Image: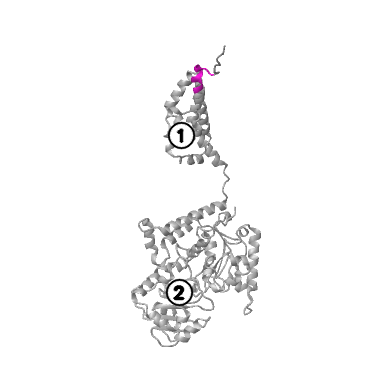
Amino acid sequence: METKRHSPYSVSMLPSISVLLLCSVLIASAYYFCSYDSSSLDLLHFAPRSQFESSGEGSRSSAAASVFPVVELRTKVITSNQIQAVRSAARSADGSAVVINRLRRNATSSSSTTAAAIDLKRKSRKPISRGEELERGLARARASIRRAAMAADHQNSSIGRVEEFIGGSVYRNSRAFYQSYVEMEKRMKVYVYKEGEPPIVHDGPCKDIYTIEGRFIHEMEHGAGKFRTEDPERAHVYFMPFSVTWMVKYLYTPLSYNLTPLRHFVADYVSVISTKHPFWNRTLGADHFMLACHDWGPHASRGSPLLNHNSIRVLCNANTSEGFTPRKDVSLPEIHLYGGNIPTQLRSPPPPSSHRPHLAFFAGGLHGPIRPILLRHWKDRNDTDLRVFEYLPKASPLDYHTFMLRSKFCLCPSGHEVASPRIVEAIYAECVPVILSESYVLPFSDVLRWEAFSVQVGVSEIPRLKEILGGIGEREYLRLKSGVRSVRRHFVLNQPAKRFDVFHMILHSVWLRRLDLKNLVVA
């Protein structure tokens, strides 16, 4: 007789098997739910909903874990109806409610578990260095400036008011300039090296043609400004406070034309700070700057090839034909202050509506290659419109500055070097500057539109000077004169320094070069 083989799994055991299968699903889902971090959850949010809607809840089995995303299992399992059904089924199969309750506790506490995992991950991250922190701040500043530069009038009414406040027409982008200036005030820190002794270091001229050199050093070291920091690790830039003018006074042998002592001093200074501190070496001097108004400033900087080629050089002698690089170097306005103050006649220019009888004016010696051309064509012509002198006549009832105040245009030819203090004097007198120069990068031209408040005439056009200036109509002249009034405060040396004055404009030019240096500070 053939005996029937019975399956080892009887029908009566099917409910228990179903419960065990469902439990395995719950265990698997609870395990995955508790182990996913925030990044994987973000990825799961992109799963298509059609997958979740293709099957009913009653058909779920242990195979579902391999078909449906874990996030779908998590969503379905922790509903109250499912928990109640699973509890009932479990009690009917040997009372394993304890296991189900444990799974439920795991599921409902998953939020705190995930938060703890994220917090642990955050704590395990390597802390950022001071250099990285500075670079992140600079990146935020760049983004803020870009947004301001692209903003339309209706997008930011406060920026619109700022444009009116600072005189938008004289700026390349007034919104970008203002936002950059605000970011500078908010973030910029300058470390001033303490090495060296006066007078060559920590001192400079304050009452002559190179006034700007000494006044900047003095304001940087002793002013009440918030830009200086005593902590070099917090600095964005590092200032080397030596004076090239005082180098010439104390180290140069008159009439020798030997500039080697100046170069040796600069080389020794860089050697000292690079040996004593780590900051020069980690960027090869790219976040360091020097300032010099003397004509020989560029020659002195060549004492250190890295300073000359890498560092920010703030120079009055901003001549591109002699190595001045606008991308990294800063053009410094030459300001001649007699006695350390603006000449009395220029402190309060006449009202804009006042009559100026002379078309243009110049008086000065035969220095450099351009002035002889100007004097050869226009000197001593007894022209009441174009007044050009080598020296003012002793019998003249008008002095130099009064002539400026009575002229529409002031001629500003280069001397031995490209810069001329006449440019700033003309701005003080609200006399439209006429730039007669070659290869000269004008001060603050990265933010100022010089064509909005000055006239540039090529050297070859000097014979046509009267024709060119006379051809500028009254409306255009008034526009230029208004531009001169708008930029005047950017060229004034205040003591103490004030917002938007020349001290802050110099710092802002350095700030722009530092913004252009990305990821320089090494941790």
Q: Locate residue 415 relative to residue 395 in the image: left or right.
A: right
Q: Residue furthest bottom?
A: 381
Location of mark 2 (residue): 425
Q: Is residue 167 in view?
A: no
| Residue 430 visible somewhere in the drawing | yes
* Tag 1 secondary structure: helix
> Mark 2 or mark 1: which comes first in sequence?
1
Q: Amino acid at mark 2?
A: Glu
**Residue, disc 1:** 72
Task: Give coordinates of residue 456: x percent, y percent.
Answer: 44, 75
- Amino acid type shown at disc 1: Glu
Identity of the residue drawn at 35% across and 73% down: 352
Q: Could you classify mark 2 by the number of other residues whose Cα lies within 10 Å: few (under 14), some (14-19), or many (20 or more)?
A: many
As measured in the structure, the alpha-carbon distance from the residue carrying label 2 to the one carrying label 1 is 77 Å
Closer to viewer: mark 2 or mark 1: 1
Q: Which residues are magenta?
A: 9-18
Report x, y in % for residue 261: 65, 72
Q: Nearer the viewer, residue 263 or 146?
A: 146
| Residue beneath the point at 64% across and 60% down | 274
Q: Is residue 313 magenta?
A: no
Q: Choose between 310 and 25: the one closer to the eye.
A: 25
Instruction: State the SS at label 2.
Output: helix
Of residues 352 and 321, the one nearer the viewer is 321
